[in-house]
Amino acid sequence: MAKIFISYRRETASGIQVVCFDLLSKHFGNAQIFMDIDTIGPGEDYAKVIKKTCESCEVLLAVIGRSWSTRSTKMGIADWMILATLSA
């Protein structure tokens, strides 16, 4: 199970999460780094994988954008970054 979980919002991360993934992978190895698009397989339950991985990770790296603290969540739309942070 991955030890480092990279949490980010696609609309605000502007690619820095990929740089973090690349640098951390070079140092710790790909198997130790979790980033949703590289780790969650087709057909897997996204919410369950996020929650399970966060609960077992040692480090959660939250990549936040300028509007992170003021973002409002629409009813019925999951905020995966909040789920990840609360599960870690």
Image: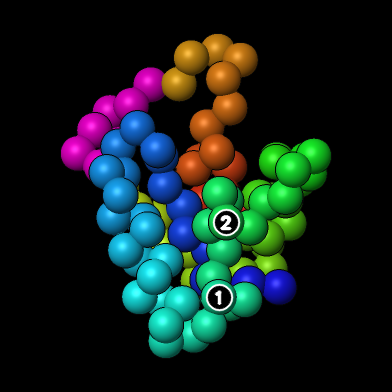
The disc labelled 2 sits on which kind of residue?
Answer: Asp
Residue depicted at 49% across the width and 42% down the height: 81
Q: Dot 2: few (<14), some (14–19), or many (≥20) neighbours within 10 Å?
A: few
In percent of the image, x 38 and y 21: which residue is there?
72
Of 82 and 63, nearer the camera is 63
What is the residue that sits farthest to the top in this orientation? 75
Dividing the picture into quadrants, the one containing residue 53 is: bottom right
Q: Is residue 69 magenta?
A: yes
Q: Quick check: 80 above or below 35?
A: above
- Name the quarter where the N terminus is drawn: bottom right
| Image side of residue 69 versus residue 10, left or right | left
Picture layout, residue 62 above or below residue 67? below
Specify the quadrant of the image occupied by residue 22.
bottom left
User: Image point 80% across, 39% down: which residue?
Assistant: 43
Q: State the image coordinates of residue 51 (x, y, percent, origin top left).
A: 69, 50
Give the main secondary structure, helix, strand or loop, of the magenta stretch: loop
Residue 12 shown in magenta: no
Residue 86 on image: x %, y %: 56, 49
Question: How many labels, in total?
Answer: 2
Mark 1, secondary structure of its residue: helix
Residue 2 visible at all? yes
Position of the C terminus, as image quadrant, is bottom right
Residue 73 at x, y = what percent?
A: 45, 21
Q: Label 2 near label 1: C-beta < 8 Å? A: yes
Q: Which residue is mark 2?
A: 38
| Residue 21 location (% of width, % of height) | 42, 66
Residue at 28% x, 28% y is 70
Residue tagged 1: 30
Q: Is residue 54 left or right of residue 62?
A: right
Sequence-first disc among 1 and 2: 1
| Range drawn in magenta | 65-72
Q: Is residue 66 above or below residue 34?
A: above
